[in-house]
Image (tube, rainbow, N blue to C red):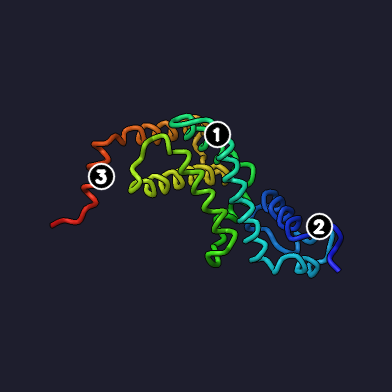
């Protein structure tokens, strides 16, 4: 019989906490079983294995990140929303590096996979961050990819102690956010028209 109190949800939550503590790469079913005080085979009554565990953690992490950004930008718009959302994402990655890494490692298995809905929520949260800039619909995906790339890159490098130069990291992050904000605000109608014309095929 499964241990009383253990469910797929509690096993997943414990796995997420452990991944944050020891690092995603070090997470194993054996270590999780030890944390929960059970034998490793007991975990298979709740999750199908390591891959399933990581997948479940990824769903949890994506939903948490979406909620974190949503709460941070609520009632804000434009620069304020973008700045608050960026800071919220950075803080989430710093506080939950293991589960965030799991979220980037897992891939949806099909259209009905809960991970699809969770990732859609994250995408919607990024879209809400930049909604106040009046971005053309055809350009939004490019903006979202840029925002994800820069925020993900900065936060994961920071967590991995990738910034070795003795200059304030906080100042660098603020500089990056200001730079992106300036670029987004510069996308007036004329500059967007130029971008769109450049994407049209030649005669």
The quadrant in which the N terminus is found is bottom right
Q: Residue at x 54, y 63 (%)?
A: 108
Q: Nearer the viewer, residue 104 or 120?
A: 120
Q: Secondary structure at mark 1?
A: loop
**Mark 2 crowdedness (10 Å alpha carbons): few <14, some 14-19, many ≥20:** some
* Disc nearer the start of the sequence (2/1): 2
Q: Residue at x 68, y 59 (%)?
A: 27
Which residue is denoted by mark 1 in the rendering? 74
Query: CA gap, disc 2 to disc 1?
Result: 37 Å
Q: Answer yes or no: do the residues labelled 2 and 1 have beta carbons within 8 Å?
A: no
Q: Answer yes or no: do the residues labelled 2 and 3 have beta carbons within 8 Å?
A: no
Percent across and percent down for residue 81 are 49, 33
Q: Residue at x 33, y 43 (%)?
A: 136
Q: Disc 2 or disc 1, which is closer to the eye?
A: 1
Percent across and percent down for residue 131 are 43, 38
Q: Which image quarter: residue 195?
A: top left
Which residue is denoted by mark 2 in the rendering? 36
Percent across and percent down for residue 61 are 62, 51
Query: CA gap, disc 3 to disc 1?
Result: 31 Å
Q: Secondary structure at mark 3?
A: helix
The quadrant in which the C terminus is found is bottom left
Q: Which mark is residue 195?
A: 3
Q: Residue furthest left?
A: 203
């Amino acid at each position: 019989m499964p241990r009383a109190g253990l469910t797929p949800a509690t096993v997943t939550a414990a796995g997420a906490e452990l991944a944050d503590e020891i690092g995603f790469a070090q997470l194993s079913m054996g270590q999780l079983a030890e944390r929960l005080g059970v034998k490793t085979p007991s975990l298979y009554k709740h999750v199908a294995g390591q891959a399933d565990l990581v997948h479940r953690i990824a769903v949890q992490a994506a939903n948490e990140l979406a909620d974190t950004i949503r709460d941070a930008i609520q009632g804000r718009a434009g620069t304020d929303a973008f700045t608050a959302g960026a800071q919220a994402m950075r803080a989430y990655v710093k506080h939950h590096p293991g589960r965030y890494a799991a979220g980037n490692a897992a891939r949806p298995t099909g259209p009905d996979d809960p991970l699809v809905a969770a990732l859609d929520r994250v995408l919607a949260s990024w879209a809400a961050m930049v909604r106040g800039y009046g971005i053309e619909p055809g350009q939004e995906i490019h903006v979202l990819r840029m925002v994800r790339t820069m925020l993900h890159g900065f936060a994961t490098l920071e967590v991995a102690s990738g910034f070795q130069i003795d200059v304030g990291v906080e100042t660098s992050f603020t500089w990056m956010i200001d730079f992106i904000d300036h670029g987004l605000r510069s996308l007036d109608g004329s500059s967007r028209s130029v971008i769109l014309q450049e994407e049209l095929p030649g005669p």
